[in-house]
Image (cartoon, rainbow, N blue to C red):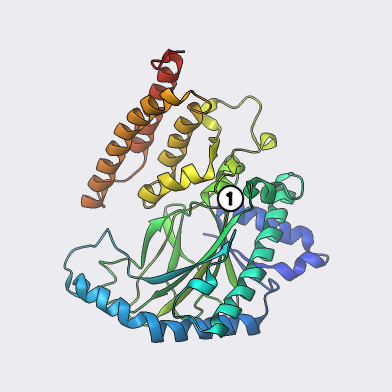
Amino acid sequence: MDNFPVINLEKLNGEEKAVVMDQIKDACENWGFFELVNHGISNELLDTVERLTKEHYKKCMEQRFKEMVESKALEGVQAEVTDIDWESTFYLRHLPQSNISEVPDLTDEHRKVMKEFAGKLETLAEELLDLFCENLGLEKGYLTKAFHGSIGPNFGTKVSNYPPCPKPDLIKGLRAHTDAGGIILLFQDDKVSGLQLLKDGEWVDVPPMRHSIVINLGDQLEVITNGKYKSVLHRVIAQTDGNRMSIASFYNPGNDAVIYPAESLVEKEADEKEVYPKFVFDDYMKLYAGLKFQAKEPRFEAMKTVGATANLPPAAATVISQNMGSHMKCWRQWRDLKMEHSEKCKEGPNMILYSSVHVTEVKEIVKAKPWGS
């Protein structure tokens, strides 16, 4: 297997730009992940972010996590735990409106530094999106415009710590999933590993590197590129030693942004099944909330259902939602079955078949217009 892609962004400004662009293209098409060095964010700022984050965990979060572990009796589990993650987290929102001043327990220095850090990451995210546009043959700014919606993108940070776990074989730090949004920028611990991605059927470690920023692609970029770029399953493995820090920032579409494949990236003769759906980002997030740890393909198929009901009269919504609700119930039953038989029951072809049948049913309902004309 090829080595995990590490890209020196500084070389974009020199004679090796073409090489770097090819590296980015390959990483987006074949990995869904890559690691950036010389990305323009100073080592001094990164060191300060790390120091303040670790101090905050020790002072404000560590005891809460221990109490949570005790309350759920996680240290004494004898079987695999599939409905909880071994992590301590809090969230910061930057766009469209910051909540940093409202988050409890942060020092003034911590708030100031995280605000500065978020600004640097926002700039880096938009720079990367334009590089993606260049590689995809899209006009500059296409992706940022696609994410904009009426009031701009959503941008937030999940600050996580993964403490030592006594039974890492039974509890995941974070269960396998793809990210729902656009582009994710991760500043992670360089001493304690744990992040893995699924490539060619094997779990691959994302190497912890000092002062690097790990990039991964979310579901929305897969949709907009009509599958040329992929969001990939990733997870965090709990460790017996060391506390792993993870600061993941999510540059996502605005709630009302309409997401659909770029026209130039859809083959003219493409079959309908080969084209990704069109939907409002907030609708996708509502679906994702209940199916985060399931396969992404049924989510995409469900969004085709939503697209089939666009611009219908109000009475139609009731009929469609009733139909969709029954299938969501089936999905939840499938999810529960998978959790019960996690090694025997894989989300995949059967789930995709289920959702494909659902799309066909909804289209037939739309054609019949049972709510009247």
Quadrant assignment, res 305: top left
Which of the two residues, 24 or 272, is positioned nearer the viewer here?
272
Which of the two residues, 174 or 9, is positioned nearer the viewer here?
174
Vertical placement of residue 322 versus 177, above or below: above
Residue 5: where, in percent of width, then height?
A: 60, 63
SS of the residue under disc 1: loop
Q: Residue at x 28, y 67 (%)?
A: 171
Instruction: Count up the numbered dots.
Output: 1
Could you tell whether 302 is left or right of 35 in the image? left
Amino acid on which disc 1 is placed: Gly
Q: Residue at x 37, y 31 (%)?
A: 321
Res. 356 in view: yes
Q: Residues within 10 Å of mark 1 (few under 14, many from 20)?
A: many
Could you tell whether 325 is left or right of 125 in the image? left
Residue 67: where, in percent of width, then height?
A: 25, 78
Q: Residue at x 46, y 76 (%)?
A: 245
Residue 200: where, in percent of width, then height?
A: 46, 52
Quadrant assignment, res 212: bottom right
Res. 4 in view: no
Q: Which residue is mark 1?
A: 254
Could you tell whether 60 is left or right of 331 in the image? right
Q: Residue at x 55, y 35 (%)?
A: 278
Vertical placement of residue 138 versus 25, above or below: above
Residue 17: where, in percent of width, then height?
A: 78, 61
